[in-house]
Image (cartoon, rainbow, N blue to C red):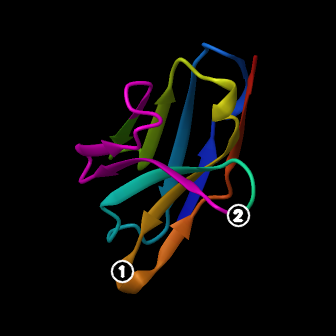
Amino acid sequence: VQLVESGGGLVQAGGSLRLSCTASGNIFSINEMSWYRQVAGPQREFLATITDGTRTSYADSVKGRFTISGDTAKKTTYLQMTSLKPEDTGVYFCYAPGLRGLQYWGQGTRVTVSS
């Protein structure tokens, strides 16, 4: 399974960005996709999850500002980010759990929010 993120960039505070994560390979076992971000150090912060293409959950830090969605036909998961703040700056990663404990991560896409 390969995950490729795109859509990062530089945006002013209060602006919006939409990130995309496209999956390829042996994805038949993937029914859950998540977004994480890494701000400083190795720790990655959970942001949002979509399960079975419909059920979603969010971290409190982004609830009401970020929306996760999926397009099954395109094998793509999106993260729509609005009302961005400078503290949202970081590297955003797509994640999917696989069978037998396998974990799949994308390479990350950088988001920079200027004040």
Residue 1 visible in the shown view? no
Residue 52 at x, y percent in the picture: 23, 53
Q: Which residue is mark 2?
A: 42
In 3D space, how far apart are the residues under numbered discs 2 and 1 (Cα atoms)? Answer: 25 Å
Compare residues 115 and 67 and report the one nearer the observer. 115
Compare residues 95 and 26 and report the one nearer the observer. 95
Q: Are marks 2 and 1 in contact (CB under 8 Å)?
A: no
14 sits to left or right of 9: left
Mark 2 Cα within 10 Å, few/some/many (few <14, many 20+)? Answer: few
User: What are the residue bounds of the magenta stretch?
Assistant: 43-67
Residue 115 within the magenta-colored segment of the rendering: no
Residue 17 at x, y percent in the picture: 59, 24
Compare residues 115 and 93 and report the one nearer the observer. 115
Q: Which residue is mark 1?
A: 99
Going 46% across and 38% down the picture, which residue do you hit? 78
Mark 2 or 1, nearer chain start: 2
Residue 54 within the magenta-colored segment of the rendering: yes
77 sits to left or right of 105: left
Q: Identify the secondary structure beneath mark 1.
A: helix
45 sits to left or right of 31: right
Amino acid tagged 2: Pro
Residue 63 vertical placement versus 103 (above, below): above
Going 56% across and 58% down the picture, which residue do you hit? 3
State the image quarter where residue 2 is shown. bottom right
Going 32% across and 71% down the picture, which residue do you hit? 29
Residue 22 visible in the shown view? yes
Image quarter of the C terminus: top right
Amino acid tagged 1: Leu
